[in-house]
Image (cartoon, grey):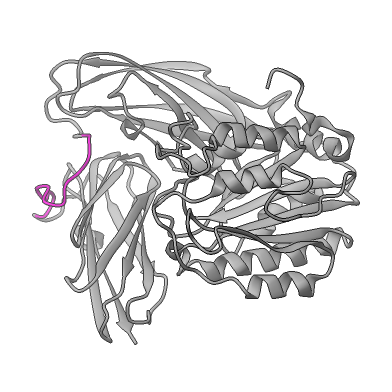
Amino acid sequence: MGTRPRWLAAGVTMLIVALASIVTASAAVTPAATSLTVAAGSSGSTTVQIDVPAGPASSPLTEADIEIAIDTTGSMFSGIAQAKADAAALVAGVQAQIPNARFSVVQFRDRLDAPEYRVEQSLTTDASLVSAALGRLTAGGGGDAPEAHNLVYTQAAQDVGSLGAIGWSPTAAKFVIVLSDAQPHGAGAAGVTGCTDVSSDPFGLNTKSSLAALAAASRTLFMVLEPGAISASLDCYQFLALQVSPASRGFTGGSSLAAQLVPLITGTTSEVANLRLAVASASPDPGAASWVSTSPSSFGPLPLPASVTSTVNVNVPSGAAAGTYTYDLVALADGLDVGHVALTLNVTAGGGGGVPGGTPTPDNQKRNRGGATTSGPDVQITGSASTGSPAPGAQYRYTYQVKNNSGSTATSVLLEDSLPTDVTVVGVTTTGGVCSAAGVQVACNLGSLAVGGQQTVVVTVQAPAAPGPVTNTATVSLAEVDTKPANNSLTIAVTVK
């Protein structure tokens, strides 16, 4: 992309200027560079301030073309209803402000699926036709974890896609909204930060090249990570969007999606829904991104202008090689790059007694089980199930929040979840730290939690085949003695029926 990107074309310039203005003038992350010295097996932390100004008011759009592409593979079985609801709310919200906005519906799956890619509805202003197209979508297929995102990007970049016409207007501002729970084929191999897939694309497509085609075709990309995602992360989706244009964003789907996207499409945004620090790069290996977490993991929603302070926590594994490790930390405002911090980590040998790093295992020795003390951390676990009555064999989620309620840092925080043997663990994600699963045993090393710090863990499971009660207990522990051990355990009961 050596030439000036065509997303600066007149039809979308006013929207881009309004949104990209956040990265100009007073947008800043301070300090711009910082360093820590941490012994192997120990932890350290530093603080960073993020300032995001308000953007200038923009003239409202009068013409918008919006493609809604929904992943309908089998892994979306429990999320397809949410994706359809997200899309329906989006149509209503945008048309309330841009009456002549047009929408198309595309479904995509994986190689050899039927269909792998299909335009269910070309661009139309008729909301009933869009609703009918959404109603036809069902989940099925999917040969492996990544899906045909690259094909979606390639087709969306064309005025008349080779696999079906979307019907883009030459004068409208053009948006592509992808709702999924998976990564594109080969996104990690293509060098997209946060994405890990290295498989070959069945069509020989390259993720970065496909996204570059979207940029050249004046598209704005919104990547929507549906709740319960297993093989993709918010980092991956936000860095995919950053490949296309400053106005492109990555979001987590759900009930607030329309509220987040409508102001961005109409150019009326006045708040940031999710402001956070993410690891853009780490060097050299094994200076993994999992060594770094932030407290809190994110901020929002926040009215603009906004100014927040984030704590950067570094947990160096025992046995890590002494030396210098470098990290590029990026501040993301709803996926928009608003500044960077260069973190230099000097690791010294011999830590002793510090925070263990690396991947936790479900049989890690339990700590902090012997009573309370009057001073020290208070780590609490709360949470809920996505449904109280899952159908036999259906997927559902346990969402846990682990928070430090006390006035001192909690280190080596570990969440352990021992599920009933007739439940199948489908996947586990965390907003910070690293998780593993062995059978029905789940363990997440969340690292350090600063004062008021919180991390969220989502465990996606498949319900037993037979109806009946399912009782699940999760616990948290830490290196210190917890002042209130009574809130270190949480039991959630659901009934399969």
Q: Quadrant of residue 16?
A: top right
Along the line of sight, the residue nearer the viewer: 125 or 17:
125
Is 367 included in the stretch rendered in magenta?
A: yes
Q: Which residues are magenta?
A: 357-369
Image position of 141 (left or right of 427): right
Vertical side of 182 occupied by 468: above or below: below
What is the x, y in percent for residue 275?
56, 41
Vertical side of 382 occupied by 163: above or below: above
Image position of 492 (left or right of 25): left
What is the x, y in percent for residue 361?
16, 47
Image position of 324 (left or right of 262): left
Along the line of sight, the residue nearer the viewer: 280 or 118:
118
- Residue at the spot x=25%, y=17% of the render? 347
Can residue 242 be seen here? no
- Residue at the spot x=44%, y=65% of the render? 74
Q: Quadrant of the N terminus?
A: top right
